[in-house]
Amino acid sequence: MNSMAVSTEFSTTLCNHCDRDIPAPNFDLHYAHCIRNLEKCRICGDMVPKKHSEEHYLNTHAPVSCSLCSETVEREVLTLHKGERCPQRIVTCEYCEFPLPVVDLFKHQEVCGNRTEYCEICCKYVRLRERLDHERQFHSGTPGVPAEPSRVAESASDWGQRGIPRGRAHDSSQKRLFFTIALTGIAVLIGSFFLQRRPQTPEQ
């Protein structure tokens, strides 16, 4: 008798409306409530209150357009799409840190990685894409070189042609300008000196 009672107490019946196993003693009450108040979402299969079914669809499954690429996706995956899948999401170049859409990243880095950077240690120009390997291979034990090399490239605005920093080119231009000004000043002073020493014609 006791074993039969235990068996009845823990037996279940499958609700064909929500596909859940319901304890047999509670099945009639559950089924009446389930069929009256709940419905299965035709897209995700979740049981949602009938009065909120339209809200569930709009907030979760309604198609929306991505503001970046205009692709239509379900609302529930819009955040994932923008963060990881959208071809127009913004990323940064690993060489110059310039922000650009991921769809353009490969072509940009093909060009950007071929720019050169002057190595102060061995006095050679090294491609940016090869900078880390260059430091590991040739300068890993060099005093003053960090164990973890810094980012291989500076900001694109800090670099000029052939990978030479614009700061160096600017310093060189300034020196030439000062030299030209100095020469011009000396020439003016010499000219003034000779003009002052010219003999004046006596008045008649």
Image (cartoon, rainbow, N blue to C red):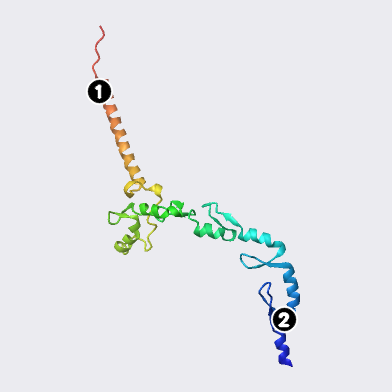
Residue 35 falls in which quadrant of the image? bottom right
Whole-percent x, y for residue 115 in the image: 34, 51
Amino acid under label 2? Answer: Ala
Q: Residue at x 58, y 55 (%)?
A: 64
Label 2, label 1: how far apart the Cα atoms are: 122 Å
Whole-percent x, y for residue 159 in the image: 37, 48
User: Residue furthest toward the bottom?
Assistant: 1
Q: Is residue 151 left or right of residue 61?
A: left
Q: Residues within 10 Å of mark 1 (few under 14, many from 20)?
A: few
Q: Nearer the viewer, residue 88 or 40?
A: 40
Q: Nearer the viewer, residue 64 or 201?
A: 64
Residue 56 is labelled as none
Q: Nearer the viewer, residue 189 or 53?
A: 53
Q: Residue at x 75, y 71 (%)?
A: 33
Whole-percent x, y for residue 13 in the image: 69, 80
Q: Secondary structure at mark 1?
A: helix
- Report which residue position mark 2 lands on: 24
Whole-percent x, y for residue 146 in the image: 36, 61
Q: Are marks 2 and 1 in contact (CB under 8 Å)?
A: no
Q: Is residue 16 left or right of residue 178?
A: right
Residue 164 lies, with reference to residue 38, above or below; the image says above
Residue 32 lies, with reference to residue 163, above or below; the image says below
- Report which residue position mark 1 lands on: 194
Q: Secondary structure at mark 2?
A: helix
Q: Residue at x 30, y 38 (%)?
A: 176
Residue 39 lies, with reference to residue 150, above or below; the image says below
**Count of picture labels:** 2
